[in-house]
Amino acid sequence: MLRLIIRVLLLISMPFILLIRGAIYLHEVHHLAPIICILGGLGMATFLLTIYMLFFYGRVTGAVGNVKRKLWMAFFLVGIFSMHGLFFLSTKNVKHSKIQKKFLSIHPILRLSISTIIRFDQTLIITDSNRMPEDYRKMGMKSKKHSLHYKQKSGYIHAIDIRTNNRSFLRNYLIRGYFWIMGFNTLQHGGTGTHLHVSLSSWDRPDSI
């Protein structure tokens, strides 16, 4: 029974993993533009979803059916999911409204990963995203020369902070595991409050997290 549950969960999660992890692979290994990385991940997820459709349709009807139609249907579903994730963030999931207003300044791959996990954990709260050097001094911390919270040469911010206070250990562990599986860097930070720091590697600052 446990093995069956694991298989089902893996089947369900694989399109999401290919969508985001595939985009990160293109970003980190091939240094492609953000939009190309997203389209690459979208293509990988579409291909897998099409295989799912062909398999289940074949099991039910005994025939393959219209492959092209299923391909377009899969592309449409993944595309709608991605478009919503890239451009929408609810005020319920941010500490301050300015984070929501600056949502589009976050790297698209990181945006898509945030929106995806929020669908499964609607209580997730983003506490910070973009910063300036003086923001660290305002928080009583030493100013940093290099931070992925700053805008990178890609034109986007590559890091966010997620609230961990008043949340169970298991929930925080699963959230951190999700971002790790997807290929992001994760750190448990103190600073002005305990939080999970999640970042996407930057080409111009490869050692920064």
Image (tube, rainbow, N blue to C red):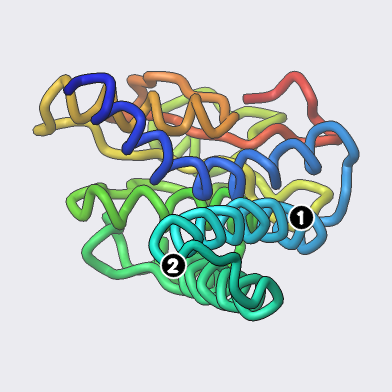
- Mark 2 or 1, which is nearer the eye? 2
Q: CA distance from mark 2 to mark 1?
A: 31 Å
Q: How many marks?
A: 2
Residue 83 image point, x, y percent: 55, 74
Numbered badge on residue 110: none
| Residue at position x 69%, y 55% in the image | 156
- Which residue is nearer to you in this view: 30 or 61? 61
Q: Which residue is mark 2?
A: 61
In this view, the residue in front, 43 or 87, is 43
Circle 2 crowding by C-alpha within 10 Å: few under 14, some 14–19, many from 20: few
Lateral position of residue 46 relative to residue 206, left or right = left
What x and y, as percent, mark residue 20?
59, 46
| Residue in the picture at 64% in, 33% down | 147
Q: Position of residue 26 (x, y in %)?
A: 80, 42
Q: Quadrant of residue 72?
A: bottom right
| Mark 2 residue type | Thr
| 142 to 126, vertically: above or below | above
Q: Residue at x 12, y 32 (%)?
A: 167
Whether residue 14 appears in this view of the structure is yes
On residue 40, the disc is 1
Residue type at tag 1: Gly
Report the quarter where the N terminus lies. Answer: top left
